[in-house]
Amino acid sequence: MSAVLGITNVTRRFAGLIAVNDVSFTLNQGEILGVIGPNGAGKTTLVSLISGTLAPTAGDIAFEGRPITKLPAYQRARLGIGRTFQIMRPFPGLSVLDNVAVGALFGHGGGESDLDKARELARAQLDFVGLAKFADQRADELGGPSRKRLELAKALAMQPKVLLCDEVMAGLNLVEIDEVIEVLKRVRERGISILVIEHVIKAIKSLSDRLLVLHHGEKIADGDPDTVLSDARVVEAYLGRRRA
Ligand SMILES: Nc1ncnc2c1ncn2[C@@H]1O[C@H](COP(=O)(O)OP(=O)(O)OP(=O)(O)O)[C@@H](O)[C@H]1O
Ligand SMILES: [Mg+2]
């Protein structure tokens, strides 16, 4: 299996706090890699370091074998790295369709330069995530679960090779979670490699080929989901804490 993303000894400090501490791993072509860990473990910071909205304090990040550590976020998007945001940021005054069209205009390969074509691509993504009926509504009129889908549609409209999902299932009910799992599985069938952060263990287990666990910014496990979830350090750090 070839690595699409290579993260090597990546550290990010915020003043006195080490949010991500010497983390290394790869995301392989066509893989769904689940990332879990307690609140504040460094998961969102990791996604920001890969997408380029934050710079690492130390370490290297490679995309398809090429170093991207020094590239700004928009150039990484052009190479094919798409992400969703845990704190959702739709353009409130724009329609749902145009929010997604923005993704199409700034995506992989420099994006679509023609607005009509961008809207066409956006409509296809809305259809794909099940939001087509809301296309002409204002984005700020959408309810929480639909906003999560909007985040996904925006990222997919960038036509990424790698999709980084930060808690796209948070706040959803079990039926909605299953629907998003199906969407992500179909995304992978398109050949897109996925890194997915999620707190719902059942969801992440059924979705992921591999699981990586962060705790206090450090990687404490990386491997087959069943093995990782029964690892003593993981149970103590993550599952044990949730039971307490
Ligand atoms: N911009 C920032 N400035 C200062 N500290 C930050 C910043 N961003 C994150 N942190 C801190 O870094 C640590 C990791 O935060 P991060 O958001 O990556 O965690 P997380 O695993 O995504 O948590 P959650 O499950 O709550 O989303 C936390 O202690 C957080 O307070
Ligand atoms: Mg987070």
Image (cartoon, grey):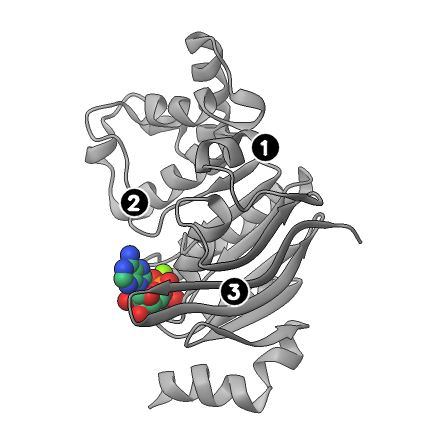
- Sequence-wise, the earlier of marks 3 and 1 is 3
- Return the residue nearer the eye: 193 or 74: 74
The circle on residue 6 is none
Residue farthest along the right direction in this orientation: 1
Under mark 3, the amino acid is Val
Q: Identify the residue position indicated by label 1 in the image.
A: 79
- Return the residue nearer the eye: 226 or 183: 226
Mark 3–mark 1 Cα distance, whole angstroms, equals: 23 Å
Q: Identify the residue position indicated by label 2 in the image.
A: 88
The structure residue drawn at horizontal position 40% and vertical position 71%, both measured from the top left corner, is 41
Q: Is residue 207 visible?
A: no
Q: Identify the residue position indicated by label 3 in the image.
A: 35
Measuring from the top left, give residue 165's x and y in whole percent. Answer: 47, 50
Under mark 1, the amino acid is Leu
Under mark 2, the amino acid is Met
- Sequence-wise, the earlier of marks 2 and 1 is 1
